Image (cartoon, grey):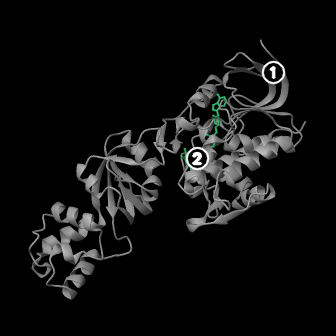
């Protein structure tokens, strides 16, 4: 044993949930040790939102979460959007709202958020130790925390805030799952989420770089439609962009059973595409397919549509058969793609799955398996849509666990 010291709370992981939990616990008078394996705090926060940190969402609700939305609801009951905004404003972070309720720091840089949290930790006397990777946790009366270098710390309460395995290049790791398992927890199937899609259709590469406002629908045969609306970005391997990312968690789960069919509706705002195409034909009957779609579709999409539907290039649109019109309309509203896999963990922003929430008290985030242990953030089987929801959940968890720990 190299070193031994006793703390009220030891928090494993100085990411979003860990930093919040550290500030809130210290404000409640606890002696807090925050252990981080990396050489800086909040590395994932730093890269979030393309380096701008979409820190919460004005419209956050339990419906924005997968996995265990009931636990997300319990966290939101204690840490609302307004609570989140007030917390960061009180730390001195100015914010502004962008489309779809997304909140960013006014500086346009995630460092505004990370630095505010780091300073709040220091001002509240949180002991932060970087380059400190927790290898083992043992529980008797108190917790014994052992680092990879052999250093030992003792604590009354432990918070596992290790995050997920997504994005290993900024600290993503399986460490939290292993520690949770060693303390009696079970881990649900882990799949990538907020990840782009590899598709079977090679022709998609002809659309590389094109962005379009669409609806992407997951065709999994269930009665409740799963779909994402917004921008899609076509790439050499398949589909990316917010409309796709927002349903990638559900797609990942379906992929466990095999390839998945999705369809892209290029015109979600048009309710009856066949009638729309017929009306358009009546206004420009002498055009050929390529010119007919000018002003309506990107040229490369038109070319692919012509090939996909077998449209003869020289035929005038007024001579299109009823079947062809139906085929074109159907393709534009439900262009089929076969998803083979999600992009790798190095590109997935979030992990779906995690510590089984049936083993957690929803209102306190205390383990039902190991009293005094709290499990927070992305390590839990809760993942959010794209739009600030994952960070909101992480902050909220940190807040709830700190509040739940008994006063001394
Ligand atoms: C590229 C990218 C962009 C994103 N953009 C957004 C966004 O704009 N908005 C949004 O809401 N969400 C975004 N997310 C998701 C969001 O960042 C995470 O959901 C959130 O950071 C999770 O918080 P956490 O506290 O659970 O884990 P993390 O923030 O990942 O923190 C976990 C910490 O624990 C440390 N750790 C792990 N194991 C150990 C150990 N054994 N010992 C010591 N330390 C350990 C890790 O190094 C890490 O610092 C993004 C994610 C990525 C990868």
Residue 225 appearing in the image: no
Up the image or down, 33 lies above or below 108; here it is: above
Please provide percent x and percent y for residue 75: 69, 50
Q: Give the label, 1 or 2, closer to the camera.
A: 2
Q: Nearer the viewer, residue 264 or 233?
A: 233
The Cα–Cα distance between marks 1 and 2, rounded to whole angstroms, is 39 Å
Q: Which quarter of the frame holds ligand 1?
A: top right
Residue under label 2, please give it. 47
| Residue drawn at x 12%, y 76% as measured from the top left | 320
The C terminus is located in which quarter? top right
Up the image or down, 381 lies above or below 293; here it is: above
Residue at disc 1, secondary structure: loop
Sooner in the amino-acid sequence: mark 1 or mark 2: 2
Left or right: 4, with 302 as reference point: right
Residue 22 appearing in the image: yes
Please provide percent x and percent y for residue 404: 79, 42
| Residue drawn at x 77%, y 59% as measured from the top left | 89
Left or right: 25, with 362 as reference point: right
Residue under label 1, please give it. 141
Please provide percent x and percent y for residue 312: 9, 69
Q: Report whether the residue tagged 2 is closer than 8 Å to ligand 1.
A: yes
Determine the image quadrant of residue 162.
Answer: top right
Q: Report whether the residue tagged 1 is closer than 8 Å to ligand 1.
A: no
């Amino acid at each position: 044993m190299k070193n031994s010291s006793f703390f009220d709370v030891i928090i494993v992981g100085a990411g979003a949930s860990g930093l919040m939990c550290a500030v809130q616990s210290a404000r409640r008078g606890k002696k807090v040790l925050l252990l981080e394996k990396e050489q800086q705090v909040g590395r994932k926060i730093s890269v979030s939102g393309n380096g701008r940190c979409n820190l919460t969402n004005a419209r956050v609700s339990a419906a924005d979460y997968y996995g265990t939305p009931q636990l997300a609801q319990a966290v939101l009951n204690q840490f609302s959007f307004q609570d989140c905004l007030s917390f960061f404003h009180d730390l001195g972070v100015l914010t502004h709202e962008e489309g779809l309720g997304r909140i960013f720091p006014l500086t346009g840089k995630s460092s505004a958020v990370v630095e505010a949290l780091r300073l709040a930790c220091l001002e509240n006397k949180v002991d932060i130790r970087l380059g400190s990777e927790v290898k083992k946790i043992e529980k008797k009366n108190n917790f014994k925390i052992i680092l990879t270098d052999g250093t030992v710390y003792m604590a009354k309460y432990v918070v596992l805030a290790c995050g997920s395995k997504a994005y290993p290049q900024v600290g993503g790791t399986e460490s939290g799952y292993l520690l949770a398992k060693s303390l009696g927890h079970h881990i649900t199937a882990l799949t990538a989420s907020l990840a782009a899609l590899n598709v079977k259709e090679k022709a998609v590469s002809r659309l590389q770089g094109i962005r379009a406002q669409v609806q992407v629908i997951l065709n999994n045969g269930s009665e409740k439609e799963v779909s994402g609306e917004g921008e899609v970005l076509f790439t050499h391997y398949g589909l990316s962009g917010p409309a796709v990312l927002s349903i990638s968690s559900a797609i990942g789960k379906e992929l466990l059973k095999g390839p998945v069919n999705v369809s892209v509706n290029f015109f979600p705002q048009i309710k009856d595409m066949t009638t729309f195409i017929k009306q358009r034909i009546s206004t420009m009957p002498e055009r050929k397919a390529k010119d007919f779609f000018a002003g309506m579709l990107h040229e490369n999409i038109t070319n692919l549509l012509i090939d996909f539907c077998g449209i003869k290039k020289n035929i005038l649109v007024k001579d299109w058969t009823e079947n062809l019109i139906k085929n074109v309309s159907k393709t534009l509203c439900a262009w089929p793609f076969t998803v083979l896999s999600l992009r790798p963990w190095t590109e997935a922003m979030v992990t779906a799955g995690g510590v089984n929430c049936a083993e957690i008290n929803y209102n306190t985030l205390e383990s039902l398996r190991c009293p005094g242990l709290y499990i927070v953030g992305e390590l839990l089987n809760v993942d959010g849509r794209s739009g600030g929801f994952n960070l909101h959940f992480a902050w909220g968890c940190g807040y709830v666990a700190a509040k739940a720990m008994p006063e001394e």
